[in-house]
Image (tube, rainbow, N blue to C red):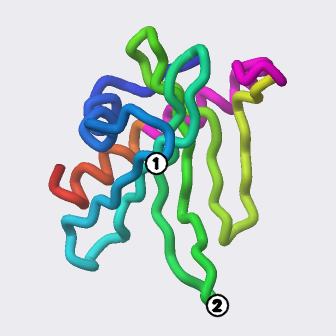
Amino acid sequence: MKAINKKAKAVFEKMTEGMTTVCSHKRIDNAEGVYMAAIVECINDCDWGLIFSIAHYYEQCGDLVSDPEMTFLQGKDGNIYPLSFQQAGLGIYQESVLFGGDGNPDKINVRLQKDHAVFAGQWLVNIKEQQGL
């Protein structure tokens, strides 16, 4: 799997600092409504490490819509790997890493996972700049 770049990794680590258990979460909103808040959640723990969701949300007809949401594996090897990308308002849902019944990565779409890593590298740096991290 392709890990995110060093700049994005530093942002990810700052955003997830102190989050070590499933169900821990935080809202990062330092821009006072100028930019969408970043919502960070620890959503799973597997043999390979912790899995996090990072998302921007907006409200449409009373529903929260991701714009976008990505999931990441914080690997025990110290690297951060994108697993999925969703942009609900456009009907986009992509899983580049599929998990088997044992809860561990089973199938990897190498090309898509690399694309997710490239996008995440840019997106996380944008969040850093927008939120003053």
Q: Which residues are magenta?
A: 101-120
Q: Which residue is mark 1?
A: 41
Say what amino acid the circle numbered 1 marks: Glu
Q: Find out whether residue 7 is within the magenta segment.
A: no
Residue in the picture at 35% in, 38% down: 19
Q: Which residue is outermost to the top?
A: 77
Q: Which residue is mark 2?
A: 61
Say what amino acid the circle numbered 2 marks: Cys
Q: Find out whether residue 116 is within the magenta segment.
A: yes
Which one is in front, 117 or 97?
97
Element under disc 1: strand
Q: Residues within 10 Å of mark 2 (few under 14, many from 20)?
A: few
Measure how far apart labels 1 and 2 are at the Cα level: 24 Å
Residue in the picture at 78% in, 19% down: 102
- Image quadrant assignment for residue 67: bottom right
Q: Position of residue 83 (x, y in %)?
A: 62, 33
Q: Is residue 93 above or below residue 59?
A: above
Element under disc 2: loop
**106 with respect to 3 (left or right):** right
Q: Is residue 52 above or below residue 76?
A: below
Residue in the picture at 57% in, 65% down: 66
Q: Position of residue 81 (x, y in %)?
A: 52, 26
Q: Position of residue 104 (x, y in %)?
A: 70, 19
Which one is in front, 86 or 54?
54
- Image quadrant assignment for residue 32: bottom left
Q: Which residue is outermost to the bottom?
A: 61
